[in-house]
Image: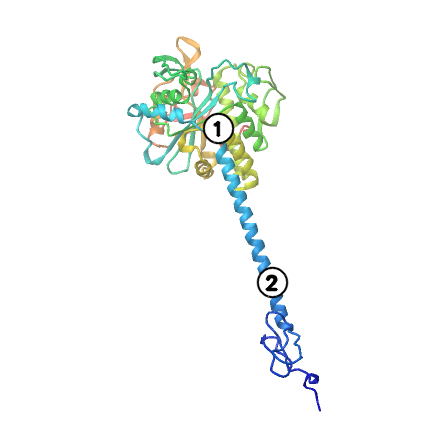
């Protein structure tokens, strides 16, 4: 008599993955276990094929879980970074409220969706890192003011420096103590001291008839951090500099300036050239052009590891109007600037000359200044020709007799070592 358990079980098909054994023989190839016992009988199957499938499904489940965890971590980190950078930005609601009071007096918005942004470098000594440049006496003036015009077609950007010593009409402005100043004829940078950003914007709009769409204010500390975030900016010096007031001592020649030195370079005045603010603006334009060139050539805007420290420094350092107070707004602005070729990022100073009644002050050169302002208002191209703002006799339209005026200036492609 032959025991059925001693009869070799039928060989299972690995590809079929049968779940239950046949009655009496009990062979099983359970798809889930690979060693299932038969429903009846004492035999057992080896389940070779289905064991491999089980392991594969087990691995896929773990891979999917790991991928989900990675996605969640990345999303969480991205959200944390976004919230951190977004929270760094300071919003200037005071200026916004003051400007609304004078809406009826302000120029019409730019044509064709062009944008005009007023960049203000504050010389305040308040706050950590700024006090070393002088005593904080409760006042601040605009050390640097630049009107940046971004063309509607996104193909050019023109940065116009407004001299701090330019004699202008400053309107009646609200002071911090809620009192008001009287309208007066004074040097331009007093507007920031009188009534802060709103007073400066209204003064610029009164001078140029150009509406300021947005504004940014940056202080000494913020400027240094921005330069350090891009690992310094290259300049070339024909002569060495030793300026104690600007905390700057540099040899002649090609060199890379980092935060502290860069700040001294753009602030130095009395020890370089003829000591005029006009020459200082020229250096500022050279440096800003080199900075733009550095950012674009290094691919900072396309590399997250390079972009983050720049954004972190920028967002911590600026005060903006509500229209530019989010990371998305600033990113959109940076993206629009990224598309502008460096040779179309132009820097110039408003046409000026020494003031008739005080050689230490400036006045506009007419009709050159009005021609420049008119082109910016109409979003028309501004043509520049070589020549620094330290050359007052050339700081106006080139007398070529052409219908399109040309102004002394430079572009970012030249950098600071042309």
Write down the residue under mark 2: 58
Residue drawn 59% across the image and 24% down it: 260
Rendered image quadrant of residue 18: bottom right
Task: Let me know if residue 414 appears in the view.
Answer: no
Residue at the far left: name it.
Answer: 104
Camera-side mark, 2 or 1: 2
* Residue 133 location (% of width, % of height): 56, 17
For the residues marked 2 and 1, what is the alpha-carbon distance in whole angstroms? Answer: 52 Å
- The reply to whether the C-beta atoms of the residues labelled 2 and 1 are less than 8 Å apart is no
Which quadrant is home to the C terminus? top right
- Residue count near mark 1 (Cα–Cα under 10 Å), binned few <14, some 14–19, many ≥20: many
Rendered image quadrant of residue 182: top left
The secondary element bearing badge 2 is classed as helix
Towards the viewer: 195 or 68: 68
Residue at the far bottom: name it.
Answer: 1
Residue drawn 58% across the image and 60% down it: 61
Q: Reply above or below: 88 against 363.
A: below
Towards the viewer: 260 or 271: 260
Q: Reply above or below: 247 against 303.
A: above
- Residue count near mark 2 (Cα–Cα under 10 Å), binned few <14, some 14–19, many ≥20: few
* Residue 79 location (% of width, % of height): 51, 42
The secondary element bearing badge 1 is classed as strand
* Residue 75 location (% of width, % of height): 52, 46
In primary-sequence order, the first of circles 2 and 1 is: 2
Residue drawn 60% across the image and 15% down it: 244
Towards the viewer: 347 or 176: 176
Write down the residue under mark 1: 318
Q: How many marks?
A: 2
Mark number, residue 244: none
* Residue 84 location (% of width, % of height): 52, 36
Which quadrant is home to the N terminus? bottom right
């Amino acid at each position: 008599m032959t025991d059925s358990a001693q009869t070799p079980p039928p060989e299972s098909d690995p590809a079929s993955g049968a779940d239950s054994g046949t009655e009496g023989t009990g062979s099983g190839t359970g798809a889930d276990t690979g060693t299932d016992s038969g429903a009846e009988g004492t035999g057992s199957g080896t389940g070779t094929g289905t064991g491999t499938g089980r392991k594969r499904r087990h691995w896929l489940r773990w891979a999917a879980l790991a991928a989900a965890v990675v996605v969640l971590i990345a999303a969480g980190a991205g959200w944390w970074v976004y919230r951190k950078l977004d929270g760094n930005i300071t919003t200037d609601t005071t200026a916004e409220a003051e400007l609304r009071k004078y809406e009826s007096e302000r120029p019409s918005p730019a044509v064709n969706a062009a944008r005009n942004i007023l960049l203000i470098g504050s010389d305040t000594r308040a706050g950590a890192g700024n006090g070393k440049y002088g005593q904080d006496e409760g006042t601040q003036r605009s050390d640097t003011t630049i009107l940046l015009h971004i063309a509607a077609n996104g193909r050019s950007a023109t940065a116009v420096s407004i001299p701090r010593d330019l004699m202008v009409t400053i309107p009646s402005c609200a002071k911090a103590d809620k009192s008001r100043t009287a309208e007066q004829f004074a040097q331009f940078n007093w507007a920031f001291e009188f009534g802060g950003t709103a007073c400066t914007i209204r003064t610029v709009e009164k001078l140029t008839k150009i509406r300021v769409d947005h504004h940014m204010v940056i202080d000494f500390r913020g400027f240094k951090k921005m330069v350090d975030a891009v690992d310094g900016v290259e300049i070339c010096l024909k002569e060495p500099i030793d300026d104690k007031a600007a905390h700057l001592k540099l040899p002649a020649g090609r060199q890379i300036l980092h935060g502290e030195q860069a700040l001294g370079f753009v602030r130095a005045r009395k020890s370089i050239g003829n000591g005029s603010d006009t020459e200082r603006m020229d250096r500022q334009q050279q440096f800003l052009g080199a900075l733009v060139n550095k950012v674009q050539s290094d691919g900072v805007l396309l590399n997250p590891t390079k972009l983050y420290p720049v954004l972190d420094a920028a967002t911590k350092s600026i005060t903006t109007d509500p229209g530019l107070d989010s990371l998305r707004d600033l990113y959109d602005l940076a993206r629009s600037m990224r598309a502008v070729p460096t040779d179309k990022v132009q820097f110039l100073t408003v046409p000026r000359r020494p003031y008739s009644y005080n050689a230490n002050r400036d006045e506009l050169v007419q009709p050159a200044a009005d021609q420049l302002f008119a082109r910016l208002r109409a979003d028309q191209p501004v043509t520049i020709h070589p020549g620094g703002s330290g050359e007052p006799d050339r700081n106006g339209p080139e007398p070529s007799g052409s219908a399109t005026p040309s102004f002394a200036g430079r572009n970012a492609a030249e950098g600071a070592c042309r």
